[in-house]
Amino acid sequence: MFDFNLHEMLLLLPAIILGLTFHEYMHGRVADSLGDHTARNLGRLTLNPIPHIDPVGFIMLILFKFGWAKPVPVNPLNFRGDMKRGILLVSLAGPATNLLLAIAAAVIYRVLSGVQLPYFTEIIFYIIYINVVLAVFNLIPVPPLDGSKILAGLLPGRQEWLHQLEAYGMIVLILLIFSGAIGFIFNIFVRPLVNVLLSLAGIHLIM
Protein backbone atom coordinates (compact mmCIF):
# COMPACT_ATOMS: atom_id res chain seq x y z
CA MET A 1 0.00 0.00 0.00
CA PHE A 2 2.85 2.39 0.85
CA ASP A 3 4.70 3.55 -2.27
CA PHE A 4 6.23 7.02 -1.94
CA ASN A 5 7.19 8.67 -5.20
CA LEU A 6 8.13 12.36 -5.33
CA HIS A 7 7.02 12.83 -8.93
CA GLU A 8 3.67 11.21 -8.22
CA MET A 9 3.27 13.26 -5.03
CA LEU A 10 3.71 16.52 -6.96
CA LEU A 11 1.05 15.43 -9.45
CA LEU A 12 -1.24 14.40 -6.57
CA LEU A 13 -1.05 17.73 -4.74
CA PRO A 14 -3.47 19.71 -6.96
CA ALA A 15 -6.06 16.90 -6.68
CA ILE A 16 -5.68 16.59 -2.90
CA ILE A 17 -5.84 20.32 -2.25
CA LEU A 18 -8.81 20.78 -4.61
CA GLY A 19 -10.73 17.81 -3.20
CA LEU A 20 -10.22 18.56 0.48
CA THR A 21 -10.82 22.30 0.15
CA PHE A 22 -14.07 22.07 -1.79
CA HIS A 23 -15.32 19.19 0.38
CA GLU A 24 -15.03 21.19 3.58
CA TYR A 25 -16.03 24.49 2.00
CA MET A 26 -19.33 23.00 0.81
CA HIS A 27 -20.08 21.58 4.26
CA GLY A 28 -19.71 25.10 5.61
CA ARG A 29 -21.55 26.74 2.72
CA VAL A 30 -24.62 24.51 3.06
CA ALA A 31 -24.65 24.94 6.85
CA ASP A 32 -24.37 28.69 6.37
CA SER A 33 -27.33 28.67 3.94
CA LEU A 34 -29.37 26.81 6.56
CA GLY A 35 -28.71 29.45 9.22
CA ASP A 36 -25.59 28.15 10.98
CA HIS A 37 -22.80 30.72 10.55
CA THR A 38 -20.25 28.89 12.75
CA ALA A 39 -17.91 28.13 9.82
CA ARG A 40 -18.13 31.72 8.57
CA ASN A 41 -17.37 33.14 12.01
CA LEU A 42 -14.33 30.86 12.41
CA GLY A 43 -12.90 31.70 8.99
CA ARG A 44 -13.66 28.29 7.50
CA LEU A 45 -16.06 29.51 4.81
CA THR A 46 -13.17 29.99 2.41
CA LEU A 47 -11.55 28.34 -0.62
CA ASN A 48 -8.13 28.99 0.90
CA PRO A 49 -6.94 25.41 1.51
CA ILE A 50 -4.77 26.14 4.55
CA PRO A 51 -7.58 26.36 7.17
CA HIS A 52 -9.04 23.08 5.89
CA ILE A 53 -5.90 20.93 5.89
CA ASP A 54 -5.47 18.30 8.59
CA PRO A 55 -1.75 17.38 8.55
CA VAL A 56 -2.29 13.67 9.31
CA GLY A 57 -5.15 13.29 6.85
CA PHE A 58 -3.16 15.17 4.21
CA ILE A 59 -0.14 12.89 4.61
CA MET A 60 -2.41 9.83 4.53
CA LEU A 61 -3.83 10.95 1.20
CA ILE A 62 -0.36 11.43 -0.25
CA LEU A 63 0.98 8.09 0.99
CA PHE A 64 -2.07 5.81 0.92
CA LYS A 65 -4.45 7.62 -1.48
CA PHE A 66 -7.15 8.17 1.14
CA GLY A 67 -7.35 10.60 4.00
CA TRP A 68 -9.34 13.49 5.42
CA ALA A 69 -9.42 17.23 6.07
CA LYS A 70 -10.03 19.24 9.23
CA PRO A 71 -13.80 19.02 9.78
CA VAL A 72 -15.73 22.25 9.37
CA PRO A 73 -17.49 23.07 12.68
CA VAL A 74 -21.27 22.89 12.39
CA ASN A 75 -23.88 23.63 15.07
CA PRO A 76 -27.19 22.01 14.03
CA LEU A 77 -29.01 23.96 16.76
CA ASN A 78 -28.69 27.01 14.51
CA PHE A 79 -30.40 25.39 11.53
CA ARG A 80 -33.67 26.81 10.29
CA GLY A 81 -36.38 24.18 9.95
CA ASP A 82 -35.86 20.47 10.52
CA MET A 83 -32.53 19.78 12.23
CA LYS A 84 -32.28 16.19 11.02
CA ARG A 85 -32.79 17.25 7.41
CA GLY A 86 -30.19 19.97 7.87
CA ILE A 87 -27.57 17.52 9.15
CA LEU A 88 -28.33 15.23 6.20
CA LEU A 89 -27.88 18.03 3.66
CA VAL A 90 -24.68 19.34 5.24
CA SER A 91 -23.19 15.85 5.44
CA LEU A 92 -24.15 15.02 1.85
CA ALA A 93 -22.64 18.26 0.51
CA GLY A 94 -19.02 17.12 0.90
CA PRO A 95 -19.11 13.75 -0.92
CA ALA A 96 -21.50 15.14 -3.55
CA THR A 97 -19.06 17.96 -4.26
CA ASN A 98 -16.20 15.50 -4.68
CA LEU A 99 -18.21 13.49 -7.20
CA LEU A 100 -19.10 16.67 -9.10
CA LEU A 101 -15.43 17.70 -9.18
CA ALA A 102 -14.47 14.29 -10.59
CA ILE A 103 -17.17 14.56 -13.27
CA ALA A 104 -16.17 18.15 -14.07
CA ALA A 105 -12.52 17.11 -14.46
CA ALA A 106 -13.53 14.35 -16.90
CA VAL A 107 -15.66 16.77 -18.96
CA ILE A 108 -12.93 19.44 -19.01
CA TYR A 109 -10.38 16.91 -20.22
CA ARG A 110 -12.77 15.72 -22.94
CA VAL A 111 -13.36 19.29 -24.13
CA LEU A 112 -9.65 20.18 -24.05
CA SER A 113 -8.39 16.82 -25.31
CA GLY A 114 -6.63 18.46 -28.25
CA VAL A 115 -4.65 20.83 -26.05
CA GLN A 116 -1.10 19.73 -25.33
CA LEU A 117 -0.14 20.67 -21.77
CA PRO A 118 2.63 19.08 -19.68
CA TYR A 119 1.28 16.43 -17.28
CA PHE A 120 -2.32 17.48 -18.07
CA THR A 121 -3.50 13.87 -18.39
CA GLU A 122 -1.84 12.80 -15.13
CA ILE A 123 -3.24 15.77 -13.17
CA ILE A 124 -6.77 15.17 -14.48
CA PHE A 125 -6.46 11.46 -13.67
CA TYR A 126 -5.54 12.21 -10.07
CA ILE A 127 -8.30 14.83 -9.72
CA ILE A 128 -10.78 12.19 -10.83
CA TYR A 129 -9.28 9.43 -8.71
CA ILE A 130 -8.75 11.38 -5.48
CA ASN A 131 -12.20 12.96 -5.58
CA VAL A 132 -13.89 9.60 -6.14
CA VAL A 133 -11.86 8.17 -3.25
CA LEU A 134 -12.86 11.07 -0.98
CA ALA A 135 -16.52 10.68 -1.92
CA VAL A 136 -16.63 6.91 -1.38
CA PHE A 137 -14.50 6.97 1.79
CA ASN A 138 -16.65 9.68 3.37
CA LEU A 139 -19.85 7.81 2.51
CA ILE A 140 -18.82 4.86 4.69
CA PRO A 141 -21.40 4.89 7.54
CA VAL A 142 -18.89 4.96 10.39
CA PRO A 143 -18.53 8.05 12.63
CA PRO A 144 -17.07 10.59 12.21
CA LEU A 145 -17.41 10.14 8.44
CA ASP A 146 -20.24 11.88 6.58
CA GLY A 147 -21.84 8.55 5.76
CA SER A 148 -22.86 7.99 9.38
CA LYS A 149 -24.76 11.31 9.51
CA ILE A 150 -26.31 10.66 6.10
CA LEU A 151 -27.50 7.25 7.27
CA ALA A 152 -28.88 8.75 10.50
CA GLY A 153 -30.74 11.33 8.43
CA LEU A 154 -32.26 8.74 6.11
CA LEU A 155 -33.38 6.27 8.77
CA PRO A 156 -36.43 7.03 10.94
CA GLY A 157 -35.95 7.87 14.61
CA ARG A 158 -32.95 9.29 16.44
CA GLN A 159 -30.50 6.45 15.64
CA GLU A 160 -28.79 6.65 19.02
CA TRP A 161 -26.62 3.64 18.18
CA LEU A 162 -24.79 5.71 15.57
CA HIS A 163 -24.12 8.47 18.09
CA GLN A 164 -22.86 5.90 20.60
CA LEU A 165 -20.60 4.40 17.93
CA GLU A 166 -18.90 7.77 17.50
CA ALA A 167 -16.68 7.17 20.54
CA TYR A 168 -15.23 4.11 18.79
CA GLY A 169 -15.37 5.43 15.22
CA MET A 170 -11.64 5.90 14.70
CA ILE A 171 -10.90 2.43 16.10
CA VAL A 172 -13.46 0.94 13.69
CA LEU A 173 -11.91 2.85 10.78
CA ILE A 174 -8.40 1.67 11.67
CA LEU A 175 -9.65 -1.92 11.81
CA LEU A 176 -11.37 -1.52 8.44
CA ILE A 177 -8.19 -0.10 6.91
CA PHE A 178 -5.77 -2.71 8.20
CA SER A 179 -8.15 -5.64 7.70
CA GLY A 180 -8.36 -4.84 4.00
CA ALA A 181 -12.08 -4.02 4.18
CA ILE A 182 -11.47 -0.48 2.89
CA GLY A 183 -9.56 -1.92 -0.07
CA PHE A 184 -12.48 -4.26 -0.76
CA ILE A 185 -14.91 -1.33 -0.68
CA PHE A 186 -12.68 0.65 -3.02
CA ASN A 187 -12.48 -2.26 -5.47
CA ILE A 188 -16.27 -2.46 -5.58
CA PHE A 189 -17.05 1.26 -5.84
CA VAL A 190 -13.95 3.36 -6.60
CA ARG A 191 -12.42 1.42 -9.49
CA PRO A 192 -15.60 1.04 -11.58
CA LEU A 193 -16.58 4.69 -11.06
CA VAL A 194 -13.09 5.96 -11.89
CA ASN A 195 -13.03 3.80 -15.02
CA VAL A 196 -16.40 5.19 -16.14
CA LEU A 197 -15.13 8.76 -15.69
CA LEU A 198 -11.86 7.99 -17.46
CA SER A 199 -13.89 6.62 -20.36
CA LEU A 200 -15.99 9.80 -20.34
CA ALA A 201 -12.82 11.88 -20.40
CA GLY A 202 -11.31 9.81 -23.18
CA ILE A 203 -8.34 8.76 -21.07
CA HIS A 204 -7.38 5.26 -22.12
CA LEU A 205 -6.33 3.82 -18.80
CA ILE A 206 -8.03 0.97 -16.95
CA MET A 207 -7.41 0.67 -13.23
Image (spheres, rainbow, N blue to C red):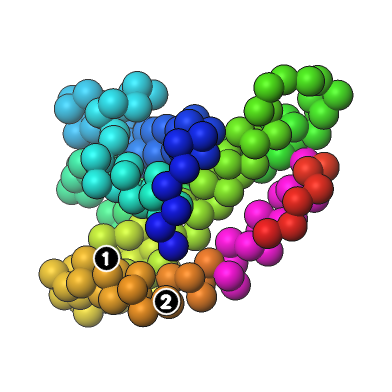
Residue visible at 31% across and 44% down? 59
Q: Is residue 157 left or right of residue 197?
A: left
> Mark 2 belongs to which amino acid?
Gly
Residue at 34% x, 27% y is: 49
CB atoms of marks 1 and 2 within 8 Å? no
Figure quadrant of the C terminus: bottom right
Indicate the quadrant where residue 167 lies.
bottom left
Dot 2 lies on which element? loop
Q: Which residues are magenta?
A: 187-201
- For mark 1, give the secondary structure: loop
Label 1 or label 2, whichever comes before in sequence order:
1
Q: Is residue 206 above or below residue 204?
A: below
Q: Is residue 104 visible?
A: no
Is residue 149 rendered to the left or right of residue 78?
Answer: right
Q: Which residue is mark 2?
A: 180
Main SS of residues in magenta: helix
Residue shown at 44% from the left, 62% from the top: 1
**Any mark on residue 106, and which?**
none
Reading the image, the residue beneath label 1 is: 143
Q: CA distance from mark 1 to mark 2?
A: 19 Å
| Residue 140 to residue 70: above or below | below
Q: Is residue 67 left or right of residue 164?
A: right
Residue neighbourhood size for the residue with mark 2, other residues' Cα within 10 Å, grouped as few (<14), some (14–19), many (≥20): few
Spot occupied by residue 26 in the image (x, y as percentages of width and height): 41, 37
**Horizontal placement of 95 versus 33: left or right?**
right
